[in-house]
Amino acid sequence: MADEHENIEERDEEFSQHEDQQEGLEQVIHVSGMYKEWFLDYASYVILERAVPHMHDGLKPVQRRILHSMKEMDDGRYHKVANIIGNTMKYHPHGDASIGDALVQVGQRELLIDCQGNWGNILTGDRAAAPRYIEARLTKFALEVLFNAKTTNWQLSYDGRNREPLTLPVKFPLLLASGVEGIAVGLACKLLPHNFVELIDASISNLKGKKVKIYPDFPTGGLADFEEYNDGLRGGRIKV
């Protein structure tokens, strides 16, 4: 009887080990599965949340959060850039350096941000002064074309304490005006800047139903050959 009892226990143990092995095999995720799930999730996050501008407003998330933060702080006076960076960290949890660099880049375009102090020079490559020394506020143009609370779709910020816009309801082709370069995972975008006055004229013509042809223009000046531009599509080339 003792031998028979031992045999039964051994068979039960073997059976439970076999079941554990089967469960372990079911939990194994093959490399192909990792690419389908984890890698695509990561790529989508980098594309949508970090590197590539949104088609609707032409802004990367950090730029949109800076402008939203500046609107939140707006009282008509200049704010220290260090304070703007600090307030923006409520919405952008990726460190103050990324916010400061993006703020200077937007400010150097002299379209949306009214700058005071040494903001660097795009012609010489000189860097801007430290955030504690320079100041900024939204331009009248930005206040007019960027914000409309009634037509803005909102989402909760990363910690759920504040609301931020999904996109800003821009009344101007900011994507073309700014020019942007972004490198994400498996995707890169490069949009060249365009002339402000030409964009206004093209927008009016477009609203009248007329077809328009518009070419990039560079804030640093110079000459460019657009013979092989191909309307900005893949494969087009510009000699500058």
Image: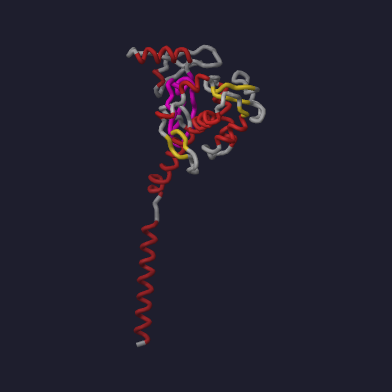
In reply to whether residue 173 is colored magenta, the answer given is yes
In reply to whether residue 113 is colored magenta, the answer given is no
| Residue most extreme to the bottom | 1
Whole-percent x, y for residue 92 in the image: 52, 37
User: Which residue occupies 55% across, 19% down?
Assistant: 110
Above or below residue 69? Residue 114 is: above
User: Which residue occupies 38% across, 47% down?
Assistant: 32
Whole-percent x, y for residue 174 in the image: 46, 22
User: Which residue occupies 52% across, 28% down?
Assistant: 71
Left or right, 225 with reference to 207: right
Identify which residue, 44 or 201, lies in the foreground: 201
Whole-percent x, y for residue 213 in the image: 39, 13
User: Which residue occupies 50% across, 22% down?
Assistant: 142
| Colouring scheme, one of rainbow, by chain, secondary structure, one colour | secondary structure
Locate residue 105: give its quadrant.
top right
Whole-percent x, y for residue 138 in the image: 54, 24
| Residue most extreme to the front | 75
Identify which residue, 137 or 98, lies in the foreground: 137
Above or below residue 114? Residue 162 is: below
Identify which residue, 211 or 38, lies in the foreground: 211
Above or below residue 103? Residue 202 is: above
Q: How many numbered circles are shown?
A: 0
Identify which residue, 57 or 232, lies in the foreground: 57
Above or below residue 91? Residue 169 is: above
Q: Quadrant of the N terminus?
A: bottom left
The residue segment tinted magenta is 166-193
